Structures are given as structure tokens and as C-alpha cells.
Amino acid sequence: MNQPYAVDLNCDMGESFGAYPLGHDEAILPFVTSANIACGYHAGDPAVMKRTVRLALQHGVAIGAHPGLPDLVGFGRREMAISPEEAYDMTVYQLGALAAFVRAEGGIVHHVKPHGALYNMAAVNLALAEALAEAVYRVHPEACLYGLAGSALISAGQKLGLATAHEVFADRTYQPNGTLTPRRQPDALITDADKAISQVVRMVKDGRVRAQSGEDVAIQADTVCLHGDGAHALAFAQQIRARLKQEGIAVRTHQPVSA
């Protein structure tokens, strides 16, 4: 019997750089179904990309490109005043870099998920969203575009006929318009694991999330982002997998369906 609820668990990976390790990639891979691999702009380097692609393939985890802004020092989390054309160019460049490693290892690129500030900018700026969607369409028309649930990026991808996945976050709070609370605000992160997991269960089963204002917001949860660089990332990944199973929610890679 098919389970009535299902969700993909994705995790940002390959974010080490040179001599500086970051995250718990190898330990977390058994608990997720999709990996978003940094492409060298906000994090990652050629050796890290190759190693992370190999690890994902070994664990049977879907590979995604994770392009970001060219800001290693700020980890891609600081907004930059870029034009849509610049957004397109830097995205194509990064998709090409990761695609080469994926092809060399015999894999395929399943999805594309922008990182950090680029992701958040494209969630509300339609011109940037259209540029990113166009880059994905030109390089990986068969891939799935992961974007903030209900955002401009999802709309732009669907307009081009790309498969899309509405993404939600376990450890972030939401605003009444469905956007994430900015990280610079003290209440942006959910640090209580039980609260974060309960938020995910409700988003998957009920299609609702409680905003910081106290009101309920409708939301679609195709894929859930788990951050792999936190001190308790591995324990959280284990806990959420166990709770989802208990709740009768299947965990599997999101299957792209074109718009």
C-alpha cells in the first residue's frame, strides 16, 4: 500500500574549501535523499566537488547543483547588487562546473537549488528568478528546480516548463507572506529539534505553517532542507527520519514532473 504522505529530504553539501572542512557530509548522506553540492562560488572547490559527487553516488542520493553568489568570505549569505544577466551567467558557469564532475563519475544532475542570498533574492525578485530558471532550462532542462515554496523562483521555473519542487525548512521560522525570517533577526532559527520536526510534520500533512505573527500560512512541502553544518546536524537528521517514519510519511527523492 502506498503511503499517503511523502517528502524528499535534501541537504547542502560539499561546502568545505581547501584546508577548511565544513559539515558532516559522509555521516549525513545515509539519512537524506537529495544532496545540494556547492559549485565553488560560495563554497567548495574542485577536489571537494569530486569527492562529494562520489559520496552521493555511493549512497544512492540524488545529486543537485547548489550555485551561489561569488562570496567565499560571506559564505554566499550576503546580498549583492547583481543584474539578471549576471545571475544567469554565474549560474550557467557553476552548473557547468558541477555537471562535468557528475558526468565524469557516471551520474546525472537531478536538481538545481540556488544557495543563500541568491536563493532568497530569487524568491521575491521575478527578474532574477526568471534569469536563474532560464539558466537551468538551458543547461539542465530535464532537472528539477528547487525553490522556496510558493516563491517567484517556482513560478519562473513552471513558466518555462521546468519540473519544480516546493522547498520548506525545518530549522527556520516563517513570515506571513511565506518567506523565511531573515537570519539577522534573533528569531530566525529554530534550535529546538522537537519543535523543528513538528513544524515539518505539519507542513507535510496539513500544508500549513505557523508564522512568527501567530497566523497559519498555507504551504506546499515537496522537499525539506536540512542544514548539514550545524553542531547537531547528524543527530537531527537521524531524529527527523525516525519521526517521519513514525508519522507514516515516506522519505524519498522528489520525482520531477514538468509543469
Image: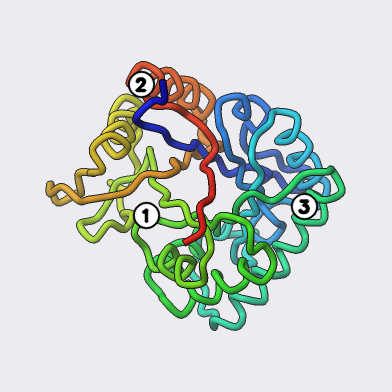
Give percent across and percent down for residue 213: 14, 51
Q: Are the two marked residues, 3 and 1, in contact with CB atoms closer than 8 angstroms?
A: no
- Residue lying at the far right of the rendered structure: 104
Give the residue pinned by disc 1: 149
Give percent across and percent down for residue 195: 28, 29
Q: Which mark's residue is nearer the viewer, 2 or 1? A: 2
**Which type of secondary structure does the marked residue at label 3 adopt?**
loop
Asked where in the image residue 209 lies, by quadrant, the reply is top left
Placement of 219 over or under 9, stated as above or below: below
Amino acid type, mark 1? Ala
Q: CA distance from mark 3 to mark 1?
A: 29 Å
Q: Residue at x 61, y 56 (%)?
A: 143
Give the residue pinned by disc 3: 45
Q: Residue at x 60, y 52 (%)?
A: 111
Give the residue pinned by disc 2: 248
Left or right of residue 136: residue 197:
left
Q: Which mark's residue is nearer the viewer, 3 or 1? A: 1
Amino acid type, mark 3? Asp
**Which type of secondary structure does the marked residue at label 1 adopt?**
loop
Placement of 43 over or under 224, stated as above or below: below
Q: CA distance from mark 2 to mark 1?
A: 22 Å
Give percent across and percent down for residue 118: 51, 65
Q: CA distance from mark 2 to mark 3?
A: 39 Å
Q: Residue at x 54, y 69 (%)?
A: 133
Give percent across and percent down for residue 54: 79, 37
- Residue lying at the far front of the rendered structure: 1
